[in-house]
Image: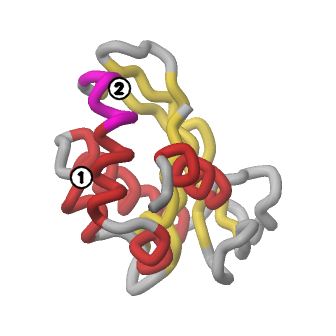
Amino acid sequence: MQTRRDFVTWLSALSLVGLARPLAADGPAEQKAEAAARAWLSLVDGGRYTESWDTAAPAFKAAVTQQQWQQALGAVRRPLGACRSRKRLSRRLVDSLPGAPPGPYVVLQFAAEFEHQLAAVETVTPALADGWRVSGYFIK
């Protein structure tokens, strides 16, 4: 069974911005991916962890079971409290990520403020898989 640390390491590997190969400039694909990421984040913000797993990309589901996801996310997000604000810092379309199937992916970074942590950075990585679906999530 994967530990929470192994799981967080996997999620962060999918979200490595510096090792991703960029594709095109900001456009409609990035906008659609961001809309999907924000909808997914609203599930997470609402404590609907099972639903967030259900709507994630196939690669995400293959890497972590629903139960592992619920446990890991609960351990990381619940202590932070409610999300008070979230502002996009960056958005980049890439064709590949280390250790992940071929893309495209959009790597999004958000500055987030939570009830119990005023400064956090969330990296959310949607993949194009039957529409844009989240394939990675990392919070720091």
Compared with residue 48, is residue 75 higher up or lower down, i.e. above or below? above
Mark 2 belongs to which amino acid?
Ser
Point out the frontmost of discs 1 and 2.
1
Mark 1 belongs to which amino acid?
Tyr
Q: Is residue 5 magenta?
A: no
Number of numbered discs on residues: 2
Residue 136 shown left or right of residue 47 in the figure: right
Q: Which secondary structure, mark 2?
A: strand
Q: Residue at x 49, y 76 (%)?
A: 59
Q: Residues within 10 Å of mark 2 (few under 14, many from 20)?
A: few
Q: Position of residue 36 (x, y in %)?
A: 36, 62
Placement of the C terminus among the 4 image quadrants: top right
Q: Position of residue 19 (x, y in %)?
A: 81, 58
Which residue is identified by label 1? Answer: 49
Span highlighted in magenta in the image: 75-81
Q: Position of residue 109 (x, y in %)?
A: 57, 42
Residue 101 shown left or right of residue 50 in the figure: right
Q: Is residue 91 visible?
A: no
Q: Which secondary structure, mark 1?
A: helix
Which residue is identified by label 2? Answer: 85
Q: Are marks 1 and 2 in contact (CB under 8 Å)?
A: no
Quarter of the image for residue 130 reads bottom left
Q: Residue at x 42, y 80 (%)?
A: 58
* Residue at the outermost bottom position: 130
* Residue at the outermost front position: 1
Q: Residues within 10 Å of mark 1 (few under 14, many from 20)?
A: many
Q: Nearer the viewer, residue 9 or 115?
A: 9
User: Separation of disc 1 and disc 2 at Cα?
Assistant: 19 Å
Q: Residue at x 27, y 22 (%)?
A: 81
Placement of the N terminus among the 4 image quadrants: bottom left
